Amino acid sequence: MKIAIGQINPTIGDFEGNFDKIHKTIEKAKAAKAELCVFPELVITGYPPRDLLVKESFVKNAEYSNQQIIAHTHDIGVIFGSITRNTHESGRPLCNSAIFCYNGKSQIFNKTLLPFYDVFDEERYFEACDKVSTLTFHNTTFGISICEDLWFQTHLFTKKVYHKNPIDFFKTQKINCLININASPFSTTKFAQRKETVGQTARTLGVPIVYANLIGGNDELIFDGRSCVINPHGDIISLAKTCEEDLLYYDTEKNYVPLAISDNKNELILKALELGLSDYVKKCGFQKVLVGLSGGIDSALTVYLAQKALGANNVIAVMMPSRYSSKGSVTDSQKLARNLGITLKNFSIERLLSGYLDLFTDEFNGLAVDSTEENLQARIRSNILMALSNKYGYLLLSTGNKSELSVGYATLYGDMSGGISVLGDVFKTKVYELAHYINRNEEIIPHEIIEKAPSAELRANQKDIDSLPSYDILDRILKRYIEEGINSDEIIQQEKIDINIVKEIIEKVDRNEYKRRQASLSLRISEKAFGIGRRIPIAYKR
């Protein structure tokens, strides 16, 4: 049997657009003589639809789209993910379903394991399947599963033991192939986890697994695709594109050689961030973005990603020098803008800053200059950027990185302003690593930007290291504490870092939760990002 995997990019709630993508993919699969076409989890609604699922109009639109797909499945079988009504009298009203249809008839398979950890909250909306079953089509028996159904006891955070393991049922059946449809978000370690988990299931069942995954950005989540087929030995034998729509084929009668896959993590991160940014901009109805260009590494990487994701004509960068801005910050920004071919505007904030300082001369008389005056500059810049954003309808991008966001080294209503943070889940050391990778063949980000000592340039001769440990030390602490959940004593012992530095940094992380609550959402590339997957109270006894 020839099976097609339709790796498409749905938009949440765009039922007409999602149907159109599915229909066109089915037609391509039919033209290629495929007998079965498989689509990812909740491809009709987009993932995750969250509280749209409590709107009756949303559910009815999904049901109508389901019927449209079923009506267009002549001469080819189709499996697609959508929502269906729970037919039982008790429980939540909806199910997360895989719908099989062929020649106008359909069969529903509901998800058994509903994740509710990290970014997932499916138990809020769906009723779990209480009976697992198989599908027989063209003399082939398939097991049908949905995403988490393969991850029994293997996910990283809750270590929850589910009430049942659907794979145990398939062990008792004589299936020829397992189909698993997914909405599995990207992280830098996720593909290796999938390969291990899906490969282990293939070895356990002794059958190939067809793994269909979404691609696209939905809010902070990025879905990287990489749909694949894994043979009974746990080897990947066919693999779809990364962060791109694709149509992958697998013929059950053919012999395939296992693929040797060698990933470059920097390349994967850049692709994921470009996709996440592009989709957020387009799916929210924007065309152009605005970036405050400081001459530093973070804004340089942000504007590079914006240019790659949206094209040079859709990126506007703004320099806003003050009395503390170095000459190099201006010339470096100009050089970067030329390299990228983007529009660069220049608004000096000196007159505005002087006006504010004059305004507070009497009020602040006798008080030492401190972060108050520094933050004035950041907020002046934010007002300029937001004025341009409001006037022209540009989306403002926040340029801060995860290291700064972690310890509060950012100004509320200042440099934290923006509709989305491109680097909010990227540590500072990784920012530099990505910049070097971008420049591996030619200088795109000026080397002067990469080599200069990090500075907010909000006071004379200011350097980040005046307020923070070096970023290589800081990021080791932050990764351990935030992403791995390790306490201060373990960090001190394992990383051999001074106890006072570790405790000071952890205190900064905990104290600045209030800032992160007011920050724009960050594109997620790690296993533990700030945002919907990390729920820490602001007011609590530390």
Image: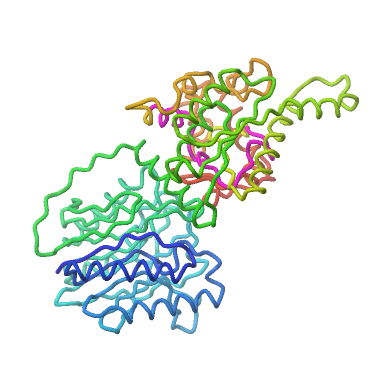
Of the pair 363 and 303, the residue shown nearer to us:
303
State how the image is colored. Answer: rainbow
Q: Residue at x 31, y 81 (%)?
A: 106
- Indicate the quadrant where residue 164 lies: bottom left
Foreground: 413 or 305?
Answer: 305
Looking at the image, which residue sits at the far right?
362
Residue 500 in view in this figure: no
| Stretch of the chain drawn in magenta | 410-436
Q: In this view, does 280 lie above or below 478?
A: below
Q: Where is residue 240 in the image (x, y as percent from the top left)?
A: 26, 53
Depth check: give the residue in front, 509 or 498: 509
Q: In this view, does 90 lie above or below 405?
A: below
Residue 84 at x, y percent in the picture: 43, 77
Residue at x 19% of width, y 62% of height: 205
- The answer to which of 83 and 363 lies nearer the viewer is 363
Q: Would residue 420 be counted in the magenta stretch?
A: yes
